[in-house]
Amino acid sequence: MHATRERPPHKAEAELAARHVDWAGGLSSEEAARRLNQYGANATVDVEPPAWRVLLGKFIAPVPCLLEAAIVLQLVLGEYIEASVIGVLLVFNAALGFFQEGRAKATLAALKSRLALNASVLRDGAWSVVPSANLVPGDVVKLTLGSVVAADVRIGEGAVQLDQSMLTGEAMPVEAGPAYEALAGALVRRGEAVAEVIATGANTRFGRTAELVRTASVTSTQQKAVLRVVLYLAAINGALAFLLIAYAWYIHLPFTEIIPLALIAILASIPVALPATFTLATAIGAQALGKRGVLPTRLSAVDEAASMNVLCVDKTGTLTSSELAVAAVVPLDGRTESEVLMWARLASSDGGLDPVDAAVRSAAGRHSFAAAPKRDQFIPFDPAAKMAEATVLDGQGRRRRVVKGALAYVIAAAKPSEQAAARAAELEQEGYRVLGVAVGPPSALEVVGLIALSDPPRPEAKSCLAELRAMGVHVVMVTGDAPATAGAVARAVGLEGRVASADAITDTVHPDDYAVFAGVLPEHKYTLVKAFQRAGYTVGMCGDGANDAPALRQAQLGIAVSTATDVAKSAAGLVLTEPGLSGIVGAVTEGRIAFQRILTYTLRSIVHKVRQVSYLAVGLAITGHAILTPMLVVISMITGDFLAMSSTTDNVRPSEKPNTWEVGDLTIAGVILGLVDLAFCVGVLLMGKDYLHLELEPLQTLTMVNLVFSGQAIYYAVRERRRIWSSRPSTIVLISSLADLLIVPSMAFAGILMAPLPLSVILSVFAAAVVFAFVLDAVKARIFSVLAME
């Protein structure tokens, strides 16, 4: 009998266990082992399904199941060759889907790798390094420069600067001192501290993010479309096949002919190459995206790019460069910008990880300081004093003190300055972080200027968002930053509209309600994406950090920028491999091209399958026999359906607006065109029976040849949303058409696997099919106009 693991305690329970901390000795080894058994390992749960399950799924979808039923029926009838051919087609479909759709990365594996692998912990009165998975609530750990926080902790003593952007999305580093709760996954940029562990594993903020990623899922619109098309065809052809069998029984057709007729009806109604065509079209689209600097991690992302009509965009690292920069320098009391930067540079480190000092160094590097004072002493940023300072010697050898830091602390250390306070308030209202710079004798500092810092927008962000809006994609900013900062960036990139807080994210929120959602956490982004999806939108999410991973995974189209963390990249469906956002525009364009190619094949399949079973029924009524044999149907599958997969390379125009799978309208168009095609095919059959007086077997050959020629007429009529002559087909399409037009007619003329047919008859049917193509095109143009199909 197996023991059951208890439910991992909630974070509040873990905090209760960690309340009484022995800062001098830490936990004992025995107590740590007991808590590890109680709370579980400090790790996340794997999410990726095993490969065998993914492969098995390729054989239990609707189309494979129909093919498998046909194989069983053929084996029962002893038609082993036909069964083998169908089996090869089945394996081809499954293999193509399995290998092309292989997931690029495992999301939870990336989440695990982002966490610290080891941690410095106090156990039994001595410091030691243990695997981070072994940490438990109540442990005393040390945070040092360059390390990654291994669990949620509360700082007991010391001070550190933390970069939590990968989880919170905030670009500004956080100064953390005693009682501050640091999050698992944060990077220590400066300082050292001792802290107590308050939550581990799934109970950390990072763990809850991982759990959202694990549970996030959405069925692609392409998968839904395939299923609906198959169900529509199955319903239509199932009803027709039932009537066909009933009629065969009614006219007392021999049982030995009824069973093959049923098999022919099943084979004729299966869109055998439809799944493979979907996969191949998106694979070709993925290759085109690779040339544009976009890497799809799953093929369905190509189709979703075509359908996306709402894009949620993270701010930090996505719309912005995720690097602090000096946005403005405000000199006071007659000073110059160059002079303010000179003093700020003297109060900054010469290197290191401090992003504020790096921004000041970069801005100062664009100026020359001919008579800069000589720095005598430098004191790095003190989290308690909120300032960095330097002692310098001017040209006359006088000693001066220079301070740079949070304005309130700088003003408190200097002479009061109403001008500085007023200008700082204006800058903060615009979303900037404001530093004060003061200079003077140690006891008489004077504020000489202000430095406004920001995370500037990427140069191409505004133009890319404008292109997306022109393509019909609604863009919404979602960020963990403060509303003022988010609003300033939104205006800079051309996003106009109201700014909302996380409280506005409800189940009924719509993209048009707000342009910006600020101050949001990972779970809020995830909830927002689900809310938009419930409202019927196809949602894209673009981000760069682990805080974006749940939303990236939940969205139909997750997009990770080139600078994104491994977590974000593995959760996304598309990864931009080159800097900038232009890859998103390219992805939408290529997705819409792939959509149009798939739409052409799908419409052709519906027309074919509607006509196929109907034609069998009418042929049975006219001749009293099946007008096709199982072998001829299999040949038709190979030469027709699979050669038509060349449509995945055709020259098409991308849609102007987001695509949607209007399967109902598609089916209506397909049924009407199928009935027109049925009339043409019946006319040829009657000519063969009543005018040429062909026997059954030559009549079956005529039927086969006619299906080939009319199939080509259908394809060229439906490949263009406009008229048939509006664009030139691709070279591969032309070659495939030529092959289709030669293979079966040549077999018919030579009498290979079918009764021979005179060349004059074959050429006559071809000429009639050419005329029919233009008739069908005129009907199609009228239908598309009424249904407003693009």
Image: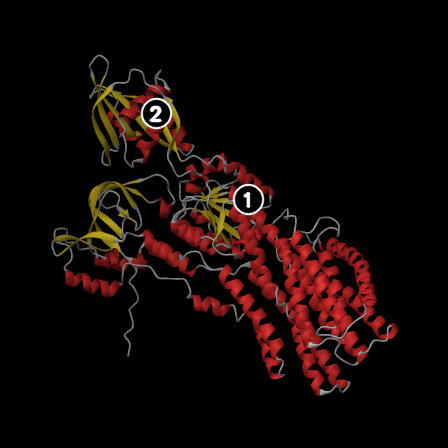
**In the displayed structure image, the side of residue 494 where residue 20 appears, left or right:** left
State the image coordinates of residue 404 (x, y, percent, origin top left). Answer: 28, 28
> Dot 1: what SS?
helix
Q: Earlier in the sequence, mark 1 or mark 2?
A: 2
The residue at which mark 1 appears reads as: 585
Residue at 54%, 55% (x, y): give it.
283
Q: Residue furthest top?
A: 396
Are there few (<14), some (14-19), or many (20+) residues within 10 Å of tag 2? many
Residue 78: image quadrant is bottom right
The residue at which mark 2 appears reads as: 364
Q: Looking at the rendered structure, which numbered label has been put on residue 322?
A: none
Instruction: Please tell me which residue lies in front, 102 or 377.
Output: 102
State the image coordinates of residue 784 (x, y, percent, origin top left). Answer: 73, 55
State the image coordinates of residue 127 (x, y, percent, origin top left). Answer: 15, 52
> Taking 431 as reference, is 68 above or below it?
below
State the image coordinates of residue 456 (x, y, percent, origin top left). Answer: 43, 34
Residue 710: image quadrant is bottom right
> Taking 662 as reference, is 491 above or below it?
above
Residue at 78%, 85% (x, y): give it.
251
**In the displayed structure image, the side of residue 396 where residue 184 appears, left or right:** right
